[in-house]
Image: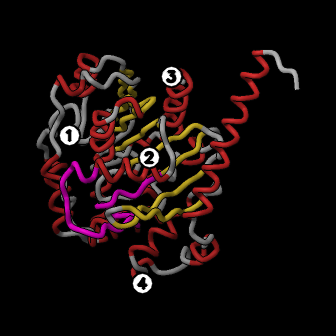
Amino acid sequence: MNLSLPRLFLFICLLTACERAQFKDQVTQTYGLADRSSEYRALVSKNPKELSGEQLYNRTLTLWDIPYRELKLPTSNGSAHVLVSGPVDGKPIVLLHGMSVDSTMWYPNIKALSEHYRVYAIDDIWGAGKSTPSHEDTEITTLVAWYFEVFELLQLQQINLIGASQGGWIATNLALSAPERFDTLVLLSPAQTITWLEPSLDILANMWFKLNPERDGLEDNLETLSSRVENIDILYKDRFFSTIKNEPRSPILLDMQPFNDAQLSRLSMPVLLLVGDDDLVNDLDTVQQANKILPNVQAEIIQESGHFINADQADLVNRKILAFLKNES
């Protein structure tokens, strides 16, 4: 076969991309769990009070109106539960959820993000999802190492990393640990990351609710977090209440504090920061600080949105994320 240099280069690129796609598909086949979508759909009609936390998680997955696979990855600290969707040859997006929630929180976003990207939603090893730790080492360095171990198992090298709330704080830790591994960083109302959490009556109300969770008070609690509580699906509300009521406090909660200017200035990759205008955790000061310190940032206030920014303004947030990723690719 006689190929010119440009054609030879194109042939090599196509062959390499094909090999990577085949490997990703092999990872999915090796660690993929059996398809239980019909079983999950059967849970929708059940009384949520009669379901376990895992069953509530599973039935919330019926809101993911796209094909997906569940992976169970063996790690040095238990197993990692990962939801995978999107084209096998798509560039990778990794989603990190917030505190007191799990990867099902991404139901308003997953279809849009998965159209052209390979999306990996990872349940935090110490969070409310289906990842299960095997020992009680709760150092932040252990958590960071665990995520990179998961990335290695998934063979992810260059990652578009998206973190919400506590997931944004964890994502920032990962990006500072190995900035060369991340093409972009998207922070959706990151908690205790750029500015300190300001005390407020809503913060106190949230703390009280977590100490004394009652189903009748869930809507009032959600109103401190969301500007559009009525748009949150009841299946997700049931799962959210379950995690509030039954999951222990995050072991890294006391470790969470804003990064200093020197640390934030090391985030050289393109960063997208989105904050709600009625956000419990962040405000205009967060955006101004980000614009002042981060070397390559696009920071915005999203109107008519609370802390649950990915749900309150799902369509707008999805468009902004995808436009950002397209511009920075």
Q: Which image quarter is the C terminus in?
A: top right
| Number of the front mark, 3 or 4 | 3
Query: What secondary structure characterizes most of the magenta part?
Result: loop
Q: Earlier in the sequence, mark 3 or mark 2?
A: 2
Q: Is residue 87 visible?
A: no
Indicate the secondary structure of the residue bearing disc 2: strand
Q: Earlier in the sequence, mark 4 or mark 1?
A: 4
Give whichever of 182, 39 is nearer the camera: 182
Q: Which residues are magenta?
A: 121-143
Check disc 1 and report the residue beneath it: 192
* Outermost residue toward the right in this view: 1
Give me the residue at 52% from left, 37% from top.
318
The amino acid marked with disc number 3 is Glu
The amino acid marked with disc number 4 is Glu
- Is residue 130 magenta-colored? yes
Q: Residue 328 bears which disc, if any?
A: 3
Check disc 4 and report the residue beneath it: 50
| Number of the front mark, 2 or 1 | 2
Q: Where does residue 196 sit, x and y in percent of width and height?
A: 15, 36
Give me the residue at 51% from left, 53% from top.
107
> What separation in Å lies between label 1 and label 3 (alpha carbons)?
26 Å
| Number of the front mark, 1 or 3 | 3
Check disc 2 and report the residue beneath it: 95
Q: Where does residue 178 sit, x and y in percent of width and height?
A: 33, 34
Q: Where does residue 257 sit, x and y in percent of width and height?
A: 15, 40
Q: Where does residue 300 sit, x and y in percent of width and height?
A: 37, 25
